[in-house]
Amino acid sequence: MHNYDPRNLRELFKLDAADYMMSICGDNGLRQISSPGKSGSIFYLSHDDRFVIKTLRRSELKVLLRMLPSYHNHVQLHENTLITKFFGLHRIKLKCGRKVRFVVMGNMFYTELHIHRRYDLKGSSYGRYTSKEKITENTTMKDLDLNYEFYMDRSLRDALLKQIALDCTFLQSQKIIDYSLLLGLHFRAPEHLKLLVGPPDSSYNNENKPTGDGLSVPPTGLMLVTHEPGSVNTAPGPHIRGSTLKAYSIGDREVDVLLPGTGRLRVQLGVNMPALANRKVQQTEPEEVELFEVYDVVLYLGVIDILQDYNLKKKLEHAGKSLFLDPMSISVVEPKLYARRFVNFLEKVFPDP
């Protein structure tokens, strides 16, 4: 196996080299999690779910190799970066003689809580929806499918949007477009999702607790409490980032999130972030007062798909689509505009409390 890494990213992220090799090269093998899409890339999960392995096109390899020194500097300077963690860039030669290039990344959904909803958000609108017939709990939905706004502690929101802006500035400097915010939601009361995806599966049962009448009811609610290092896991992980966050609501002290009936988790940027998910109720007749459903959620998020540069092919694609579509509605726009639209969209997804 050929290793492309010009710098030791695993050391930077405090990842044990032996554990890394056992995860991606162990006897248990890899699990394919998606068939080739438009890009032709195939995604795999390591047997322990810690890492995502993606096959690379030659053009993506060139972008990543060009970007790696700047990427290294960015993640070293910004320990709370939301950008995908790259742990390895490798090439293997198959028995047939074909060479396969692949990158190893942290699995953002390697979490202590079950992920009930997944969204891939770009800030564009053309084609950004999912057919309702195809939605299951494991479906990754898109911008127009998102009907929630997420309200969180003021300091948590400020830290989140500040880092998103910093990461977008970096990606703009590298002439990168087409990236997304991958957002995972853990609902404290997931039973309301039954209307959309059918009966909840057995994974809900891990968090359920019996009541006196024998019914199983998921524990609800969450609260921010002062961080106690001895009470939570503080070890670096494949998707864990940086420092423990501070919350305005408890005097700008570092915080954990306490989930009744489940446990206590360290709050970091993009990891274990508590919020209220507001969804407007669709009313059959106009009413004087708008109604909203409100749910306690824990958010997991990060910036993914950062290997598409604004090359000649993409410039021509933008020019062609702009002839018959609103240029602001399509994903392919120049890097500065892409970054600004992305940030503006996420400011609406995470409104000021």
Image: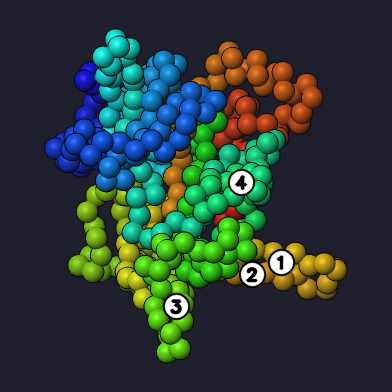
Q: CA distance from mark 2 to mark 4?
A: 24 Å
266 and 134: which is toward the camera:
134
Query: Which residue position is annotated with label 3?
Result: 216
**Regarding mark 4 in the picture, which secondary structure is present there?**
helix
Query: Which residue position is annotated with label 4?
Result: 134
**Regarding mark 3 in the picture, which secondary structure is present there?**
strand
79 and 140: which is toward the camera:
140
**Regarding mark 2 in the picture, which secondary structure is present there?**
strand
Q: Which residue appears at 30% of the width and 11% of the height?
A: 96
234 horizontally vs 277: left or right: left
> Quadrant of residue 101 in the image?
top left
Q: In the picture shown, does residue 25 fall above or below 4?
A: below
Instruction: From the image, state whether disc 1 or disc 4 is nearer to you.
Output: 4
Instruction: From the image, state whether disc 2 or disc 4 is nearer to you.
Output: 4
Where residue 213 appears, as percent x and y from the top left, is 45, 88
Query: Which residue position is annotated with label 2?
Result: 293
Q: How many marks?
A: 4
